[in-house]
Image: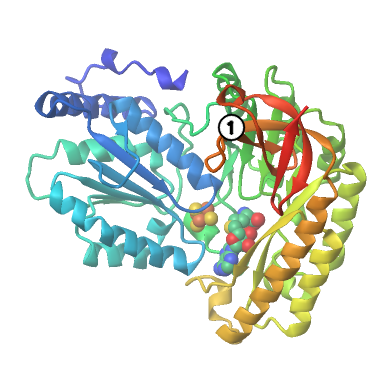
Amino acid sequence: MYNEINLDSIDLTTAPPEKEPSRQYYFMAKCREWIKEFKKKNNRCPTAYVQTFGCQMNARDSEKILGIFKCIGYEEADSEEADLVLFNTCTVRENANLKLYGRIGQLKKYKKKNPNMIIILCGCMMQEKQAVDKIRRSYQNVDIIFGTHNIFKLAQLLAMKLLDESGNNKMIIDIWEKSTEIVEELPTERKYSFKSGVNIMFGCNNFCSYCIVPYVRGRERSRKPEDIINEIENLVADGVVEVMLLGQNVNSYGKNLDNPISFTELLRRVENIEGLKRIRFMTSHPKDLSDELIEFMGQSEKLCHHLHLPLQSGSSRLLEIMNRHYTKESYLKLVDKIKKAVPDIAITTDIITGFPGETEDDFKETLDVIEKAEYDSAFTFIYSKRTGTPAASMQNQISDEVIKERFERLLKVVQDTSAKKAAQSVGKITDVLVEEKNAQEEGFVTGRTGQNYLVHFKGDKSLIGKIVPVKLCESRGFYYYGERC
Ligand code: SAH
Ligand code: SF4
Ligand code: F3S
C-alpha cells in the first residue's frame, strides 16, 4: 500500500535519488527527522491544517497533501491555529481569489503568536502570475507557494523550509508552466474510509471561452488504466466501496495514451473489480458523451444512476461563443437518449448567467432547457470575468443589475424544477450508502442514494460505510427523510 512507505529504511547520508517517487520518499524521511527533533523539544507532534477551496479535483489533491503530512509525522489540526497551514486554492471565479486574500490576512494573528508557523499556498490560483505577484508583495507571512503541476514535490519544498539554516526566511516559490510527468504511488489520507475520488486524468483541452481551468491545470493527460485499476484495487482492499472517477472531461479519457482506450472501456475494467460496489464519475462534457457510454450506463450493475452534464447556457447562439460544441437541440436529444437508456437517471448541471452578450431571449432558452431536461439539481453561477480568457475581452459585458435579476429568476426555476423532480421518488425504496451521523438530529444518520440525493434516517454510527435499503418518505428539496427497510 502507498500509505505503508517505509521511511526508516532510507539512507539519508547519500544524495537524494533522481527518480520519482523515490526522490520524494527521501525528502519525506528528511522532514520526519526534523519532526522527531520537534517532538523531543516540544513534547508533542506538530499540527497541520489543510483547507480546500474549489472542486473535487482540489479535494482529491488535498487528500494527497494530507497523506504526505501524516506520513512525515504531522497531526491533523481542525483549525487554523496550527504549526502548518496550507490553503489549496481555486480561481474559477474572481470572488474565490478575493476570499483567499482575506483568509491569508487572517493568519497574521496566528503567526504572531507562533512565529515558527508555516504557511503554504498551492492550487489553481497559484498558477496565475498576478495573484502570486500580489502575495509576494503584500503577504510576506507566506512561506511556500507551489502550483498544480508539482504537488508531488511538497515534501521536497517543505524540507527546504524546515532544514533551512540560513535564517533569511525567504519565501519559496516553485511554479511550473506545465506538467512533465504523472507521479504515482504517493501517500494519501482519505476523508472517508469507505469512498474515494480517483483521478483518471488531469487538465483540460476544451478552452470554453469563459473558463480559466485549462490555463491553470494545463493540457489533458490521462493516467494509465493499469495505474488506475491498481489504485482502486488497493482502495477496495482498504475498505472503499464507492469510487468517483475524476476528470474535467472524463469522456475524452484515454485519447492521449500510448495505447488509447475509451472511457467506457476503462469503466468496464473498473466494474470488474471485486468488492467495489458503486462507481461515479465527474464531469461529462455533453459534446463527448458517447452512445457506447450511454449503453453501458444502462447495463452496468455498479454505475450510480447520476450524471452531471453541465449545460452552461440553453442558447445555441451563446453556446457557440462559449466554444461548447453542442446546441440546445443536440443537448436535449442527448438528455432524452440517456433517460431512455436509464429511466431513473438523475441529471444535474452547471449553469452560468450573465455571459457577455446574453440577451433576455438567450436567458429564456436556458430556462426552457431547465424545464425540459427536468434537472434534479443545478449549480448556478454568475458569470465572472477571468483575465486571459477570450470572454474577458468581449465588449458586451452585462450590467450587474441585469445579471442579479436573471440570477434570481434562474434560482427560482431551478428550485421549482428540482422540488418537482424530487417529489416523484417519494415512496420508493432505494439503496443508500451511509456517510455520517447526522449533526443536527440525534439518533439519525445521513447517506446518499445512487442518484446522489442525501437521505436522513434513524440509525446509529455502526451503519457508516454500509449500503442499506431505505424508503424515501418525505422530500425536502435536495434531501429526503427516510425509513430503513
Ligand atoms: N470541467 C467541468 C467544469 C469545471 S468548472 C465542465 O466542463 O463541466 C465548474 C463550473 O464552473 C463550470 O461548469 C462552469 O459552470 C463554472 N464556471 C467556469 N468558469 C466560470 C466563469 N468564468 N464564471 C462563472 N462560472 C464559471
Ligand atoms: Fe472549463 Fe470547459 Fe474545461 Fe470544463 S470543459 S474545465 S468548463 S474549459
Ligand atoms: Fe477551481 Fe481549479 Fe477546480 S480553478 S474549480 S479548483 S480545477
Element type at marker 1? loop
Q: Quadrant of the C terminus?
A: top right
User: In the current view of this chain or complex, which residue is farthest to the top?
Assistant: 9
Identify which residue is drawn at 13% across, 40% down. 164
Q: Nearer the viewer, residue 239 or 411?
A: 411
Q: How many marks?
A: 1
Q: Nearer the viewer, residue 429 or 404?
A: 429
Report if residue 268 is visible in the image: yes
Quarter of the rendering containing residue 276: top right
- Label 1 amino acid? Gly
Identify which residue is drawn at 51% across, 62% down. 92
Q: Position of residue 371 (x, y in %)?
A: 83, 65
Residue 243, placed above or below residue 230: below
Quarter of the rendering containing residue 227: top right
Identify which residue is drawn at 54% across, 80% down. 393
Residue 97, placed above or below residue 44: below
Identify which residue is drawn at 75% across, 44% down. 306
Q: Position of residue 142 (x, y in %)?
A: 23, 54
Quarter of the rendering containing residue 241: top right
Q: Position of residue 136 (x, y in %)?
A: 24, 62
Disc 1 packing (10 Å; few <14; some 14–19; many ≥20): few
User: In the current view of this chain or complex, which residue is farthest to the right?
Assistant: 340
Which residue is under mark 1? 443
